[in-house]
Image: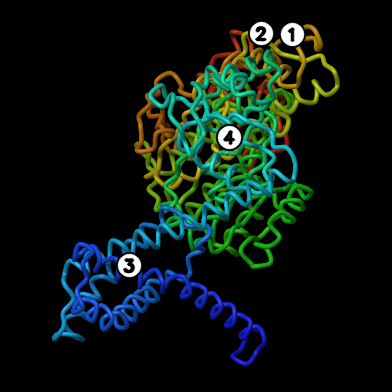
């Protein structure tokens, strides 16, 4: 129940406000009196004649009344004096200027017979600003000294060096210095700019560059280095860790300043992780544009239990959709996601849907019931070797589900359809990658991207990127498990490389790309430089305090079925073009007409129940750049017209049982 005028809560709040205002008046009135008296003293060179004294005494009441009225209007009483900042000082200056203008106006209106000299009003305004700012600054200094004394009484603080850029370092430095219970005492900074050397930030000296972190820590007798996440490049993080390990100096990571400001993480130091060594920069989003796009709309996310799908759900929820539909066929995954988003579910903002995207009737029912306006299609299988064993399931899950959802997005005239793709779709050697390439072409064709396609009001967009750090079953969790078990670490090839980005970064860029796309584009995210898996393994072992080859053995297992030695982001014939966003590019080149891709998809889905060789031949007929290992040189040519006709016949409901028994695709 809300507090009323008669409730105890109301009276308690009123008493607090009254007490706060009285305290403010107790120190503010003497300051204003002293300011006006000082203005007279300075204006008349210390010789205040009896007439000026009389003028001062007569003007004092109404000058105080005018100034206090303006200060009340400017809500200066709400400032927490012990925490005054530069922002408060600027605000105070503005209000004081307004108060001086009000005094000047009142001077002519209230007391035309005895006007205050304009010099007195001007000097009074300056003195008022200086005296109030001085009092508030003194109050803050006394508070900080008292808190530092209290923190020393709690126990010995650990001397630390802060490593990062100037802006991030300044924020963390002030946070540490203002914290009563911090166990850290900053004794120095290392930065990324040569011109900042031998200067200070908030009284803490800049001792050197990031490359000299260990030497700076030893010079300052610091036992710990605090690295600011995202403010130090990955290559430099690796160098700092190696230096400090040799010098027996502890290295910890403090969160990215942007994420703390946004309220995503707590200010809690942690050990250096492999993500820090890879050094992905923080994404800068056009938040206002994204909110305008998503706010008040019904948004559907498929594959919501996956690494990308679940993070997409969190990112989209922060953009205030009218309804967020989370679709996945994993009952357990949906249960735990529902628990995480329980508050939004209770507010009727999120709907958890357990459904299979390969089921066209179920998908039709969902579109008819909820009428989603924006679709993010992240549902797909991802484990390449497993899909080599079950190519039919890959076809149904990747190609079939994409066709179902994209066709429904067109039928129900949705605003946008955004499909998540992979670098494995480029010059594919695996069934999974080839299926993703087919899905890319299908989605692209729906947007009028090539001659003969059907126009649609819906914007169909694809976003292609590489591996994400820490997704379930990926290389980093596998390495962590193997290290915890004492090894060995298994690597398929010593020269294998992969592109990596963080899950939040990928998800944020997917949403941004979906927002800016006109339709028909294949957006490619800037993945940075490829990472050698051998180096990744060595870094992870080193971060665990061990040495590769001494404490943990390494085994080369050989490439698995469908795996590539290195991934590519652009196919032969594709060209890359920049967009207005630095980390989002566009791949232009190979397209396929709506009629062509429809025929191929019909053939492919018909072959899903056939054997692996037949499926690979059908995929090869659709994607000539597909290089399957299980087909010999003669099999690598496009499927014959007879084979394609058979597959189309198998897709027809009028096909006979006898025709279905034929297997012309068999090896």
Q: Which residue is mark 3?
A: 35
Q: Position of residue 96 (x, y in %)?
A: 31, 66
Q: Position of residue 528 (x, y in %)?
A: 49, 24
In the image: residue 296, left or right of residue 449: right
The reply to whether callout 4 and callout 3 are in contact (CB within 8 Å) is no
The reply to whether callout 1 and callout 2 are in contact (CB within 8 Å) is yes
Q: Which residue is mark 1?
A: 556
Task: Tell me the number on the disc at residue 494.
Answer: 2
Mark 2 or mark 1, which is nearer the start of the sequence? Answer: 2
Q: Position of residue 578 (x, y in %)?
A: 35, 31
At label 1, counting other C-alpha atoms closer than 10 Å, the crowd grade (few under 14, some 14-19, many 20 or more) is few
Q: CA distance from mark 3 to mark 2?
A: 77 Å
In the image: residue 608, left or right of residue 624: right
Mark 2 or mark 3, which is nearer the start of the sequence? Answer: 3
Nearest the viewer among 218 and 108 is 108
- Kind of element beneath mark 3: helix
């Amino acid at each position: 129940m809300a507090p009323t005028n008669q409730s105890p809560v109301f009276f308690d709040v009123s008493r607090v406000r009254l007490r706060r205002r009285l305290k403010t008046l107790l120190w503010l009135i003497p300051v204003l009196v002293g300011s006006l008296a000082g203005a007279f003293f300075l204006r008349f060179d210390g010789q205040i004649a009896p007439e000026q004294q009389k003028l001062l005494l007569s003007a004092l009441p109404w000058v105080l009344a005018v100034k206090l009225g303006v200060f009340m209007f400017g809500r200066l009483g709400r400032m927490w004096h012990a925490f005054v900042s530069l922002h408060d000082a600027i605000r105070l200056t503005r209000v004081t200027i307004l108060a001086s203008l009000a005094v000047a106006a009142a001077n002519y209106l209230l007391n035309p017979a005895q006007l205050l000299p304009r010099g007195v009003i001007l000097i009074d305004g300056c003195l008022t600003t200086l005296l109030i700012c001085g009092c508030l600054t003194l109050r803050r200094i006394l508070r900080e000294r008292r808190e530092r004394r209290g923190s020393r009484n709690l126990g010995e603080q650990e001397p630390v060096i802060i490593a990062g850029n100037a802006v991030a370092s300044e924020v963390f430095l002030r946070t540490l210095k203002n914290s009563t219970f911090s166990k850290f005492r900053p004794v120095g900074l290392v930065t990324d700019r040569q011109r900042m050397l031998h200067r200070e930030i908030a009284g803490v000296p800049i001792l050197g560059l990031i490359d000299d972190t260990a030497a700076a820590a030893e010079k300052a007798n610091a036992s710990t280095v605090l690295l600011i996440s995202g403010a130090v490049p990955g290559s430099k993080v690796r160098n700092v860790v190696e230096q400090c390990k040799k010098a027996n100096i502890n290295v910890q990571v403090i969160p990215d300043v942007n994420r703390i400001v946004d309220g995503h993480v707590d200010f809690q130091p942690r050990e250096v992780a492999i993500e820090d060594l890879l050094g992905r920069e923080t994404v800068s989003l056009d938040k206002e544009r994204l909110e305008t796009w998503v706010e008040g709309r019904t948004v559907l996310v498929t594959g919501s239990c996956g690494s990308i799908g679940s993070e997409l759900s969190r990112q989209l929820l922060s953009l205030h959709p009218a309804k967020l539909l989370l679709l996945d066929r994993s009952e357990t995954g949906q249960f735990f996601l529902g628990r995480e988003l329980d508050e939004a579910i209770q507010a009727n903002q999120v709907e958890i849907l357990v459904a299979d995207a390969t089921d066209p009737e179920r998908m039709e029912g969902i579109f008819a019931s909820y009428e989603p306006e924006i679709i993010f299609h992240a549902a797909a299988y991802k484990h390449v070797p497993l899909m080599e064993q079950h190519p039919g399931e890959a076809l149904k899950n990747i190609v079939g589900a994409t066709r179902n959802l994209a066709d429904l997005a067109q039928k129900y005239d949705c605003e946008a359809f955004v499909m998540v793709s992979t670098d494995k779709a480029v010059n594919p050697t695996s069934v999974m990658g080839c299926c993703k390439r087919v899905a890319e072409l299908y989605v692209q064709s729906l947007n009028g991207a090539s001659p003969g396609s059907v126009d649609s009001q819906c914007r169909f967009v694809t976003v292609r990127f590489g591996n994400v750090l820490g997704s379930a079953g990926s290389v980093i969790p596998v390495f962590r498990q193997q290290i915890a078990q004492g090894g060995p670490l298994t690597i398929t090839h010593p020269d294998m490389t992969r592109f990596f980005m963080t899950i939040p970064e990928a998800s944020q860029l997917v949403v941004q790309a979906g927002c800016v796309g006109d339709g028909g584009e294949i957006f490619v995210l800037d993945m940075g430089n490829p990472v050698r898996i051998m180096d990744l393994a060595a870094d992870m072992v080193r971060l665990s305090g061990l040495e590769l080859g001494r404490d943990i053995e390494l085994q080369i297992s050989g490439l698995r079925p469908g795996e590539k030695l290195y991934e590519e982001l652009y196919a032969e014939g594709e060209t890359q073009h920049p967009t207005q966003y630095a980390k989002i590019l566009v791949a232009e080149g190979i397209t396929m007409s709506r009629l062509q891709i429809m025929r191929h998809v019909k053939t492919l889905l018909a072959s899903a129940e056939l054997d692996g060789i037949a499926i690979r031949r059908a995929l090869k007929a659709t994607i000539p750049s597909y290089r399957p290992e299980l087909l010999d040189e003669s099999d690598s040519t496009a499927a014959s017209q007879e084979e394609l006709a058979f597959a189309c016949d198998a897709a027809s409901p009028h096909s006979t049982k006898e025709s279905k028994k034929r297997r012309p695709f068999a090896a």
